[in-house]
Image (spheres, rainbow, N blue to C red):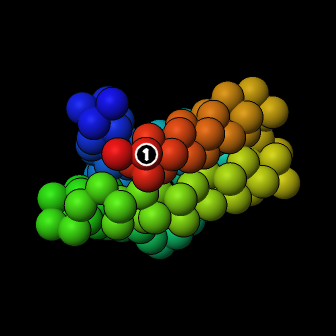
Amino acid sequence: MTPLAYGLAIALNLMILFIGVRFLLTPIASAAGYGVPAKPDGDRAYLTIKGLRDATYGVLGLALLAFAGARAEAWYMLVVALVPLFDTVIVLRNGGTRAVAFGIHFATAVVVLISAALLFAI
């Protein structure tokens, strides 16, 4: 179970790091993928903030796993699962589709919670 727990945690952290970098490089396209399209002539600062937030979460998760161990990463995953849960609400409240809200954001929260459970179990 240890390789699965570590593998899933690494994959999730790399994915959120990728999402953050994508928001920094292609913010308008990334916002559309998030589920709430941005205005072409605005919102750049907020999209940059989202990119930095996500990239930082990815780097922090990898650092915790490497330097503090599975238990610290498990607590981190438990707490950071709040982000995709609230992203679900944000998408729903701002005209996004239920498919994106639940199929991407809520599903991500569930996978992050599974990762936390696996890390707590080792």
- Residue 26 seen in the current view: no
Residue at 62% across, 39% down: 110
- 74 above or below 53? above
Q: Quadrant of the C terminus?
A: top left
Q: Nearer the viewer, residue 32 or 50?
A: 50
Quadrant of the image occupied by residue 121: top left
Q: Is residue 65 left or right of residue 44?
A: left
Q: Is residue 73 left or right of residue 105?
A: left
Q: Is residue 18 left or right of residue 116?
A: left
Q: Amino acid at mark 1?
A: Ala
Q: Nearer the viewer, residue 114 or 36?
A: 114
Q: Position of residue 27 (x, y in %)?
A: 43, 51
- 43 above or below 62? below
What residue did someone put label 1 on? Answer: 121
Residue at 70% across, 58% down: 86
Residue at 67% across, 46% down: 36
